[in-house]
Image: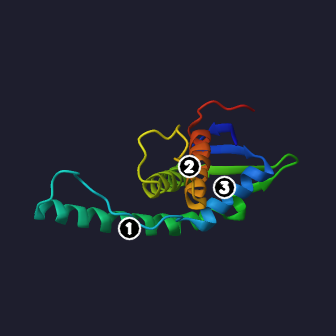
């Protein structure tokens, strides 16, 4: 995925056929992870901290539901144009931000499922379960697309 042009609040990206299939699959199947327990503090265990964590978890669940609904328009045919070498995806600023939020949710959710590892460059302790391999792969795919969306130099 590479940025072709950015002008007038619109971004045009070129995706190879496989990249387009993967990105669409991420959007169609979002969310991949169940809402996790969000901790505001690892040391604070009083009633106020628990109330804040409950509020945070409810807020995050609501936000994720909104993102799930907002993912559907990103799959609309008018955003995707087939070209000789793949697909051209056109996003306005709002759609681009939504896509970034979805991809970030995938990355963070997978990271939490993996046990919030400190060093993501280290391979998981053997033997890695299929769920761990899938989580790392999803996290890497989301990161790949996030980086492409944040690239600020057009290649056209």
Q: SS for tag 3? A: helix
Q: Residue placed farthest to the right in the image?
A: 84
Q: Is residue 122 left or right of residue 7?
A: left
> To which residue does mark 1 refer?
61
Above or below, comparing residue 89 to residue 29 in the picture: above
* Crowd around label 3: few <14 · some 14–19 · many ≥20 (10 Å): some
Above or below, comparing residue 154 to residue 141 in the picture: above
Q: Earlier in the sequence, mark 3 or mark 2?
A: 3
Q: SS for tag 2? A: loop
Residue 34 picture quarter: bottom left
Above or below, comparing residue 6 to residue 60 in the picture: above
In this rendered view, identify the residue nearer to me: 98 or 25. 25
Camera-nearest label, 1 or 2: 2
* Crowd around label 1: few <14 · some 14–19 · many ≥20 (10 Å): some
What label sits on residue 23 in the rendered view? Answer: 3
In this rendered view, identify the residue nearer to me: 146 or 34. 34
Query: How far from the left and from the top, in percent, is residue 88?
Result: 75, 49
What label sits on residue 126 in the rendered view? Answer: 2
Q: Is residue 61 left or right of residue 79?
A: left
Query: How far from the left and from the top, in percent, is residue 58?
Result: 31, 68
Q: Earlier in the sequence, mark 1 or mark 2?
A: 1
In this rendered view, identify the residue nearer to me: 33 or 22. 33
Residue 118 picture quarter: top left
Task: Point out the image quarter for the C terminus.
Answer: top right
């Amino acid at each position: 995925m590479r940025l072709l042009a950015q002008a007038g609040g619109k971004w045009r990206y070129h995706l190879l056929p496989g990249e387009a299939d993967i990105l669409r699959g991420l959007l169609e199947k979002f969310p991949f992870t169940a809402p996790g327990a969000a901790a505001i503090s690892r040391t604070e265990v009083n009633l106020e901290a628990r109330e804040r964590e409950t509020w945070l978890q409810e807020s995050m669940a609501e936000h994720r539901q909104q993102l799930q609904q907002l993912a559907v328009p990103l799959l609309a045919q008018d955003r995707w144009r087939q070209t000789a070498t793949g697909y051209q995806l056109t996003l306005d600023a709002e759609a681009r931000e939504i896509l970034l939020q979805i991809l970030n949710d995938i990355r963070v959710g997978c990271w939490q499922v993996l046990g919030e590892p400190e060093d993501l460059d280290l391979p998981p302790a053997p033997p890695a379960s299929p769920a761990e391999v899938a989580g790392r792969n999803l996290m890497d795919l989301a990161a790949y697309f996030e980086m492409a969306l944040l690239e600020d130099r057009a290649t056209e």
